[in-house]
Image (spheres, helix red, strand yellow):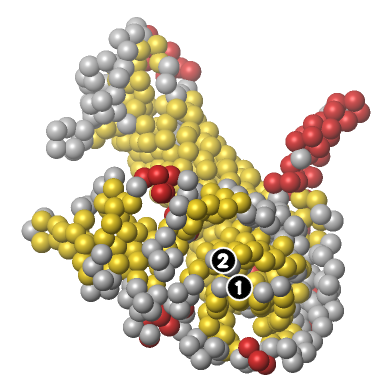
Amino acid sequence: MFQPVRLLCCILLFITGSATAQPLLWEHSPASDNGLSYWQYMHSLNIASANWYSQCKDQNCSYWVAVGEQRFRVGKNSSLIAQSRYQQVTYALYRNGEQYYLADNHGQRVAVADAALANCVSFSDGVISLRGELICLSGRTLRVGNRSQTLPARPLYYRFATSYRGHWVLAMLDKNFNLHVIDASGQRQTRTGLQRHSDIDHTLSVFPQAPGNTWVALYEYRNKRNKNLSLYHLQGDNARHYTVTNSIGDDTGVRPELYQAADNELRVSTRLRSSTKFYRLRPESLPAQQPEANPYQTPDLADLLIGAGVRATHWSVSQSVESPPGSDGSTDKLASVKYDMNESVLQEYRLAGQLAGNQIALTWLTSEAEQGMNQLERSATRKLYGSIGFERFFHGPTRLQLEFASELAGGVATYRDNNGAEQVVAFENDYQRFALLVTSELGWLSGVSYSRNNMPMAVGFFESGLGDPDIYFDPDFELQKLTYVIGYDTAQYTSRYLFNSRGFYLDGRVGIGLYRYDIGADILRQAEAVSGKEHNDDIGLALDGFVEAGYFWQARSVRWGGLGAALQAGVSADVETYYNGISEDSEIEADEIRAAFERTDVRWGPFVRLNLMF
């Protein structure tokens, strides 16, 4: 553990001396920290908006959808699905129970047939035209009211938009990274600067100036040292490309928003990790711009993150056997275990990214799987991997991230039964966790996590009828858990979009899944012998939560192709809950017994982590 940390420290010192990344290479005009979003701008024009409201008094609640000054009463089982705001009228599509309605700020409301929405993938992504037509997408089919047309390609990513002047447009990217715009006047397309490793989601904003006249803002991630916020103007048969900003070392350009003000000024904003920048551009100034050429044009050879960290862990464990809930939902604690845990050290390692177009974590997994194989078996395995085509699942910023964590924690478990007899057991919990995660844009990740641990526990065995259970103390109890995890990782965001960065941060993850428990053989034999029945069920529900807060410091070198290192320090906490209780609805066969218990682990402590990036 300490040799990798020492190596990372040396690299960190080297990078500190050579990190000279300039955040922006070029921008058309200086940015402002103050500005209006498109939503706020429409408010400044006094354009009505729609909202869903609820109000309760003495347990009596009322619900309504407000469109401007108009109110439409709805029930509790209702929701606002979409709205489109124009200077002339504002429309709202909402659901009340099983019925859908289209209402406006002039007080008009009509029921919407289910067939009008049945073919939409999700109407929350759609818009409503000035004439009150529902516009949405279904696969390669664009639906405008009762009309439909086939799109020129299947969308890789798309955005609908309306203008306060009364126009609508669909902008989409296809698999070859062409930009298509479709409106009431027809279809147009142009090439973009996107490529295989560019961001795709949340990169595009579109504004229809008029039918056949559309502006598009697009974030074009070309490599870690070349990120462009571009403007495309598609008018008639012409398509022109302009640059708002080009960034080397920061995240300017992410999550763009574009609209055109009443005086025809283009307003472009980009929502960075730490702030929002606002640009105000005159269309007539764009043809004369002369952006500085970015010298880094080739795709990244390497995009790697290797990390190692330690945490001084404090443990708190709550474990019990409880009775089935009564009519009022309360339970009685039938048995519990008290744990005195020693402080322990959690060691963790991370590996993510790609090298020469190959996922480095996938390559390592393949190599590990081939250990011990002969040449014929190795060739067959590689052919199988090739036929599955794992690499096609990783596009844009998607990377496979491997995580491994281990912790050996000693402690003493004290169990006292209903007769006052006490059992005390010293034990070591060999905790291990292995996670296979897929990173996505803007720091998000998801995947699966496997862990196992062992800890003495009280276990109750219930029979049919749910009478008083037989309770045993099992010193050999073990758990294996598999969960689906989703969360946010600051290190992933900064390693992709930023060079030099520092500041406080907050990360988190949540997980849900199943666990399998192994009751000690002696306890299981004894429980089955006493009851004369068999125990079969060994699966339970697991819920996990993780939070990490601290300070982040990162330095990278432009000259050395983005080579850099980052230090994270702070406090992290894990909460793991294992549910395996019994309720009045539990069905237990006459010839079986079922184990019941509940347990919650809380582990927290200060940590430090070092990341090396290429």
Observer-nearest of 399 and 65: 65
Classify the position of the C terminus by image quarter.
bottom right
* Above-or-below relation of 508 to 481: below
Classify the position of the N terminus by image quarter.
bottom right
- How far across and how far down the image is residue 96, in percent? 26, 51
Observer-nearest of 351 and 422: 351
Residue drawn at 57 percent across, 85 percent down: 266
Observer-nearest of 37 and 236: 236
Q: Is residue 366 visible?
A: yes
Q: Which residue is tagged 1?
A: 212
Is 40 placed left or right of 159 in the picture? left
Asked if labels 1 and 2 touch by Cβ distance under 8 angstroms, the answer is: yes
Badge number at residue 335: none
- How far across and how far down the image is residue 115, in percent? 40, 44
In primary-sequence order, the first of circles 2 and 1 is 2
Is 329 placed left or right of 426 in the picture? left
Q: Secondary structure at mark 2?
A: strand
- How far across and how far down the image is residue 86, in percent? 40, 75
Residue flagged by tag 2: what amino acid is it?
Asp
Q: Which residue is tagged 2?
A: 183
- Quarter of the image for residue 488 reads bottom right
Residue drawn at 53 percent across, 83 percent down: 260
- How far across and how far down the image is residue 258, in percent? 55, 77
Residue drawn at 54 percent across, 66 percent down: 184
Instruction: Categorize mark 2 by other alpha carbons within 10 Å: few (<14), some (14-19), many (20+).
Output: some
- Quarter of the image for residue 288 reads bottom right
Residue drawn at 25 percent across, 64 percent down: 108
Is 180 placed left or right of 193 in the picture? left
* Above-or-below relation of 560 to 366: below
